[in-house]
Amino acid sequence: MRWLLMVALVSGCVSKKKYDELDSQYQQTLSALQGKSDEATSLQSALAQEEARSAQLGQELEAMKARQAALLKDKSALDIEVVQMQTALAELAARKSQADARIAEFQSLLDKFKSLIDEGRLKVKIVNGRMVLELPTDILFGSGSASLSQEGKEAILEVAGVLGTIGDRDFQVEGHTDDVPIATAQFPSNWALASARAVNVVKTLQEGGVPVEHLSASSFAENRPVDTNKTKEGKASNRRIEIVVVPDLSLLPGYEELEKLGQ
C-alpha cells in the first residue's frame, strides 16, 4: 500500500502533507497488526500451557480417584478385620469364662474332698483335660476281691455325697490293676476283676445318691499304669479306681458344628 502512496506523490496526485498523514496512519495500522499478532502468539502459548496444566490436573485427579478407591478397599478390609477380631475376642472371653468355671469347679471339689485327701484316701487331679478322682484299691478291696471293704464303702459314700452336688454331670468309674495276672473261677483275668470292682463302686455311688443315669463303669485292667510295675510301691499305685468327671462337650469350641454333623 505504501508504494501506491509514493506513486501518487510522484505523479502529483497527493501533496507531501497528505502523504505524511497517510504514511503515519499506515505505520500505526502496521504496528497495531504486529501487536495483535504478538498477542495472538502469547495467547496461543498461554493456551498451550493451560492445556498442559489441565492434562496434569487430569492425571492427578485420576491418581486421587485410584487412591480413594484403594483407601475405600483398605477400609472395607479393615472393617472386616475389626469385626473378625471382635468375634475372636468374644470367643476368647467365652473360653476364658468356661476355663475359669472349670477351675472354680476343680477348686470346689478339692475343698469338699479335703478330709479324704488329707487322709490319703483320695487324689483329685486333671488328666488329659478330664477331672479325675483316684482311690487306691488297697483301701477299697481285699486282694483279688471285688467286694468293697467297710472302710472302702464309707469312702465311696462320702465321695457320692459330694458328686451329687456337682449338678447335671456324668461320671465314669474306671477299674485299673497292676500287671500281676489273675485266673480264678470268679475272675479269669484282670479285665474281669477291674470290671467287677468298677461296677460295685457304681452301685455304691448310686446308693449314695448319684443318679444311675449319670453313672457308667469301664475296665482297663493293667493297660493304663500310672507308675512302674517293677516295684511294690508302683504296683500299689497302679491298683486303683478312678472316677472321671466326664467333660460337658457342649462347652467345648466347635460343639455346634459337631452336633450338626451328627444329625
Image (cartoon, helix red, strand yellow):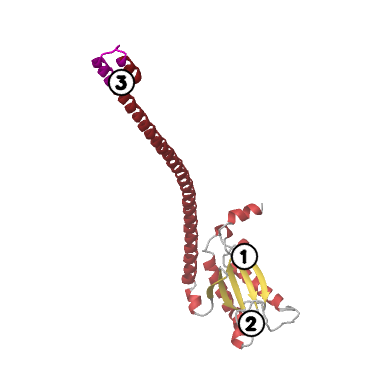
Which residue is denoted by mark 1 in the rendering?
215
Q: Is residue 205 above or below residue 256?
A: below
Measured Cα–Cα span from mark 3 to mark 1: 126 Å
Instruction: Give residue 238's position: percent from left, percent from top.
Output: 62, 80
Within-10-Å neighbours for mark 1: few <14, some 14–19, many 20+: many
Residue drawn 48% across and 70% down? 112
Q: Residue furthest front?
A: 11
Tell us which disc is closer to us: 3 or 1. 3
The three-letter code of the residue at mark 1 reads: Leu
Closer to the chain start, of discs 1 and 2, is 2
Q: Which residue lies furthest to the bottom in this view?
A: 231
Which residue is denoted by mark 3 in the rendering?
26
The three-letter code of the residue at mark 2 reads: Gly
Q: Do the residues labelled 3 and 1 touch (CB within 8 Å)?
A: no
Residue 245, quarter of picture: bottom right
Over which residues does the magenta segment extend?
9-26
Measured Cα–Cα span from mark 1 to mark 2: 24 Å
The three-letter code of the residue at mark 3 reads: Tyr
Residue drawn 39% across and 37% down? 49
Tell us which disc is closer to us: 3 or 2. 3
Judge left or right: residue 162 versus residue 176: left
Which residue is denoted by mark 2 in the rendering?
142
Is residue 113 or residue 208 the one in the foreground?
113
Tell me which secondary structure the magenta stretch mostly adopts. Answer: helix
Q: Residue furthest top?
A: 13
Instruction: Give residue 74's position: percent from left, percent from top.
Output: 47, 48
Magenta stretch: residue 115 in it?
no
